[in-house]
Image (cartoon, rainbow, N blue to C red):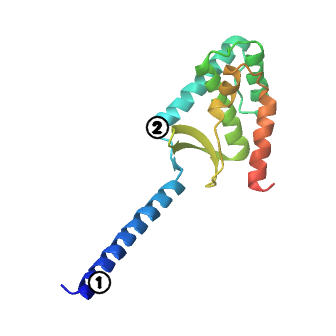
């Protein structure tokens, strides 16, 4: 085999290796850009939300004779009352997250958001999303994360903070 033929084979091999390397690098770059997926809620997810809402609503009716009314002011006040009177303790994660579902429903109604299933490398969460934006809120754990760490939860302040973020996302 001549030196020219050998050189050409080496060059072709190097070019092929560089092409393969470029494909691998581009594939990895694309994979890194896809940090999360958004999926429609499944029936089981909607049932989870419905059951949580019903569970905390039943507790409010039994304790105070009042239920959540799909009114932001009333529902936020009732959530706060449940925390202040310790009807829901800081150690009751399920009920705290049920309260987050109610808060989520307030956001959903007030700002025309949609429940979605948000999936990333850490797992799946139910979240609220505006239209098809990349802005998500995770109301189910908003109250529980704070209460479980011993922080005082001001539901109205939490609502107003998220409300302002939503309005800024929308450009208002």
Q: Is residue 163 visible?
A: yes
Q: Mark 1 and mark 2: span between their CA atoms?
A: 61 Å
Q: Quadrant of residue 8?
A: bottom left
Residue at horizontal 79 percent and vertical 39 percent from the top: 161
Which residue is the extreme one toward the front?
Answer: 3
Query: Residues at badges 1 and 2 in contact (C-beta under 8 Å)?
Result: no
Q: Earlier in the sequence, mark 1 or mark 2?
A: 1
Image spot of residue 170 (x, y percent): 75, 54
Q: Quadrant of residue 96?
A: top right
**Observer-nearest residue: 36 or 103?**
36
Which residue is the extreme one toward the left?
Answer: 1
- Dot 1, how many residues are within 10 Å of its Cα: few (below 14), some (14-19), or many (20+)? few
Q: Secondary structure at mark 1?
A: helix
- Position of the N terminus, as image quadrant, is bottom left
Left or right, 60 with reference to 31: right
Left or right, 169 with reference to 25: right
Residue at horizontal 40 percent and vertical 66 percent from the top: 21
From the image, tell me which residue sits under label 1. Answer: 8
Mark 1 or 2, closer to the camera? 1
Q: Secondary structure at mark 2?
A: helix
Q: Answer above or below: position of 71 versus 20.
A: above
**Observer-nearest residue: 166 or 37?**
37
- Position of the C terminus, as image quadrant, is bottom right
From the image, tell me which residue sits under label 2. Answer: 43
Residue at horizontal 68 percent and vertical 47 percent from the top: 112
Left or right, 101 with reference to 25: right
Left or right, 49 with reference to 44: right
Residue at horizontal 80 percent and vertical 30 percent from the top: 156
Image spot of residue 118 (x, y percent): 54, 43
Image spot of residue 119 (x, y percent): 51, 43
Q: Is residue 73 visible?
A: no
**Observer-nearest residue: 146 or 8?**
8
């Amino acid at each position: 085999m001549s030196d020219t033929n050998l050189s050409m084979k080496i060059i072709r091999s190097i070019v092929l290796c560089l092409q393969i390397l470029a494909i691998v690098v581009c594939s990895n770059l694309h994979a890194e850009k896809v940090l999360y997926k958004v999926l429609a809620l499944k029936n089981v997810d909607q049932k989870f939300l419905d059951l949580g809402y019903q569970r905390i609503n039943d507790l409010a009716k039994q304790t105070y004779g009042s239920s959540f009314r799909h009114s932001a002011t009333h529902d936020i006040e009732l959530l706060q009352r449940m925390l202040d009177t310790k009807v829901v303790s800081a150690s009751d994660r399920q009920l705290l997250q049920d309260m987050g579902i109610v808060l989520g429903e307030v956001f959903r109604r007030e700002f025309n958001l949609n429940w979605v299933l948000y999936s990333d490398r850490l797992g799946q969460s139910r979240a609220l999303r505006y239209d098809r934006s990349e802005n998500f809120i995770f109301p189910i754990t908003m109250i529980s994360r704070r209460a479980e760490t011993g922080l005082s939860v001001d539901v109205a302040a939490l609502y107003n903070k998220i409300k302002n973020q939503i309005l800024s996302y929308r450009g208002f």
